[in-house]
Image: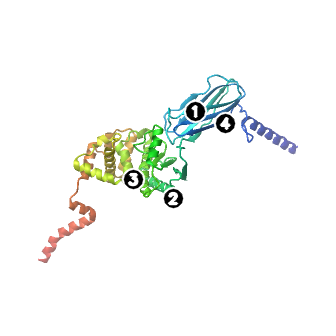
Amino acid sequence: MVNKLRTVIRLGLALGLLGTLFLYGGPFGPLIAASGITVVESEAEHRFAQRITFRLEVASEAEITQVYLFFHAAGDEWTETVDLVEEPELDLTREITYVHNLRDSPLPPFATVSFWWQIEDAAGNTLTTDPKQFEYTDNRFQWEQLTSGDITVHWVEGQGDPAFGQTVLDIAQASVEEINAELRAPVPASIAIYIYDSQQNLEAAMALTGRDWAGGQARPELGVIVLAIPHEQGYASRMKRFIPHEITHLLTYQLVTPAGYRYVPEWLDEGLATANERLPEPDYALALEKAREEGRLIPLKDLCDPFSPGRQTALLAYAQSGSLVQFIREEYGAEGIRALLAAYADGAGCAGGVQEALKVSLSGLETAWRTSLTPKSPWQVWIEQIGVWAGLWLLMLLAALPMIGGLRR
């Protein structure tokens, strides 16, 4: 009796499994789903800055009456919706192709694109597919790739050996750790760094996609950095300057959240990035000193907004911002930097954030910073070089000399 009961149970389980495979598909390929609609194939492929081709093959027990395509690129605020069926057709299996023109409607380069379908039939069944993703990369080039943890480095195939990619990865990892010792920001879930082999190719890619990244090659909302670093002598020096700069933008964005990032003034965002360069641009110091001598320093209130595109003005703006951030670090410490970012994350204005975080007006901060740029006397420089304690020791010695002379008399 027990053996018969076991046989019945096993038979029931087998029939249930067979029914499940028949309804939902199994190792033998997709079958008609319980809803009466099944997707046989769903895919997308792209040609950078030209088009994306979406393909759908769908089967249904009843007449297909409607198909919608939805796709969304990370970094864009809206989802594209396309109505793909204008008139009902009687085919139970249908292949649908839609080509999206990227020249007329560009997407953010290097973004992750999600797409999904909604299918309806005459029986009243509706099927909405799970989203699928693809990376909208610049596939005009073949890319080498190296990944460690959350950081992935891509560089144009043939422009460097594995040591080239490893150098990018090492500098990026060290930069995240060093910069976050001050910011204490959440690290992005993923950081993708793309290295073009020339500035010309990078600028062409940005122009083709209708996205101007001239003010910086970082898209914080995507966790993407795009740089031009040719594989030539001195490439490591360029990496040490550019990679920490752009990673600072990513971490700042993470710290103040997407909503607060638009309130961070340009002098703080770019000043932090400039001050974090591991190998600073030598022209910054020269531009700053020359402007100070000639009385051409840019008012701080003018640096709250995006910098001028003019090369010389932009160079001075970056130099001033980096110098100002370094001054705040020395006067207020890392706590002062985090307090500023917290104030702007809450929506403070340019001047209001300084007042709230540092308890000083914007003009007061500017005055103190400008004063710090004034050339120091040889005596002040000497005291700073030998150190405060050595200076105190010297002062005590000078004070004791009269006493020693009195004892000798």
Tell me how far mark 1 sits from mark 3, CA to CA: 43 Å
Give the camera-side residue of 311 and 406: 311
- Give whichever of discs 4 and 3 has the lower sequence position: 4
Question: x and y percent of residue 126 in the render?
Answer: 65, 28
- Per the image, the residue denoted by label 1 is 99
Tell me how far mark 2 sits from mark 1, CA to CA: 40 Å
- Give whichever of discs 2 and 1 has the lower sequence position: 1
Which mark is in front, 3 or 2?
Answer: 2
Q: Secondary structure at mark 4?
A: strand
Which disc, if any, is residue 277? 3
Graded by Cα atoms within 10 Å as few (under 14), some (14 to 19) or many (20 or more), the crowding at tag 2 reads few
Residue 183 visible, this angle:
yes
Tell me how far mark 3 sits from mark 2, CA to CA: 21 Å
Which mark is in front, 4 or 2?
Answer: 2
Q: Give the number of marks.
A: 4
Graded by Cα atoms within 10 Å as few (under 14), some (14 to 19) or many (20 or more), the crowding at tag 3 reads many
Which mark is in front, 1 or 4?
Answer: 1
Give the camera-side residue of 18 and 319: 319
Tell me how far mark 4 sits from mark 2, CA to CA: 40 Å
- Per the image, the residue denoted by label 2 is 163
Which disc, if any, is residue 335? none
Amino acid, disc 4: Glu
- Per the image, the residue denoted by label 4 is 41
Amino acid, disc 3: Glu
Q: Residue at x 82, y 41 (%)?
A: 9
Question: x and y percent of residue 168 in the render?
Answer: 48, 54
- Give whichever of discs 1 and 3 has the lower sequence position: 1
Give the camera-side residue of 204 and 37: 204
The vertical placement of 371 against 133, above or below, is: below
Q: Residue at x 33, y 54 (%)?
A: 282
